[in-house]
Amino acid sequence: MINDINSAQVAAIDSLAAASTLDEVNRLAADLTSKKSPISQLKAGLGAITDAEERKQIGQAINAAVGQIATAIETKRQELGDAVRQAKVAAERLDLTEFLTEPTRGHAHVVTQAWERLEDVFIGMGYQVAEGPEVETDWHNFEALNMGEGHPARGEFDTLFVEAVDEQYRSGDPGRLLLRTHTSPVQIRTMLTNEPPIYVVAPGRVFRRDTPDATHMPVFHQIEGLVIDEGITMAHLAGTIEAFTKAFFGEGFTSRLRPSYFPFTEPSAEFDIQLPSGDWLELGGCGMVHPNVLRAGGIDPERWSGFAFGFGIDRMAVMRHGIADLREMYTNDLRFIEQF
Ligand code: DAH
């Protein structure tokens, strides 16, 4: 009888070991614990044993086997349950390995780099950075800069006008809306909101109705400078341009002013820089702020005087890096952008 118990136990445990799914284990467990299972049959036969001591021993052996089988069932259930959970976890696992690879870092665009370097140089010279809106009024962009209605210089700026959506601008004052054609209107805004002395630069985006080519873009960037103080002369302007040229380009560079004309300055000049090679390159315009402009900015020209300058940031970047075509800077081709 003990042998029968052992073999029933071994058979039960072997069948459990062979099970590969939870369903199978559940079915087996139902069979192995049913009244018809071999071990239950053996238990049912206990009553037929007449010797009390023997019956006790056999009974204990059967109980031990039942216990072993129950443990085997539980163990197998856990084992398969773990496997099911692990399979589920594996199936739902997010592949995050890409975050472990070396991340590619971007960097500031070549124009932004030039913009920030220019700001740094002027901040180092004691200037503050001013801003103005890209959608400007006709008044700030032209009128206040000594370019009244019909002024021929207006024609040189291929202006993009904006349909006014704000009633304030339809009523005539302060005039039609446009995309600013230069950063010079920031001069006016700065004068109207600040008391002199004023030392500011205003970098920003400007717009002109131009067909893109190697040297023109309809959207480009300028940096404007404005100084208003007592006793400011052309010599301060020339000295400032020279100090800036050396700080930005290096000690080997010098600058010069050439007489020119701008409606908002009198006298006006264009400034060039000389490369170590000896070549001269035109950089921008400048001059002494016209009294009409000072008045438009609410500043008394009898007491205060000042100078202003403006030049293209994209151009500076092109010159610094020897870029052949301005359009390259705005096609967002990574092969180009990543070089700077
Ligand atoms: N606003 C001029 C332009 O876009 C550049 C310029 C010339 C700015 C002379 C100035 C200046 O401040 O004094 O062509």
Image: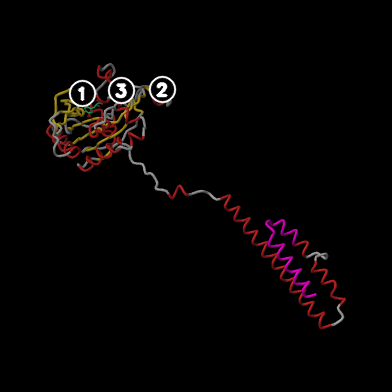
**Does ligand 1 reach within 8 Å of label 1's beta carbon?**
yes
Q: Residue at x 37, y 44 (%)?
A: 105
Which residue carries the number 1 mark? 262
| Left/right of residue 232 with respect to residue 15 in the rendered view | left
Q: Nearer the viewer, residue 36 or 154?
A: 36
Question: Which amino acid type is shown beneath numbered disc 3?
Answer: Asp
Question: Which amino acid type is shown beneath numbered disc 2?
Answer: Glu
Mark 3 or 1: in front is 3
Quadrant occupied by the C terminus: top left
Q: From the top left corner, tell me how far across and down residue 133 is, in percent.
A: 34, 32
Question: Which mark, residue 213?
Answer: 3
- Is 10 colored magenta in this rendering? yes
Which residue carries the number 2 mark? 163
Label 2 CA crowd tier, 10 Å (few <14, some 14–19, many 20+): few
- Quarter of the rendering containing residue 143: top left
What is the number of callouts on the image?
3
Quadrant occupied by the N terminus: bottom right
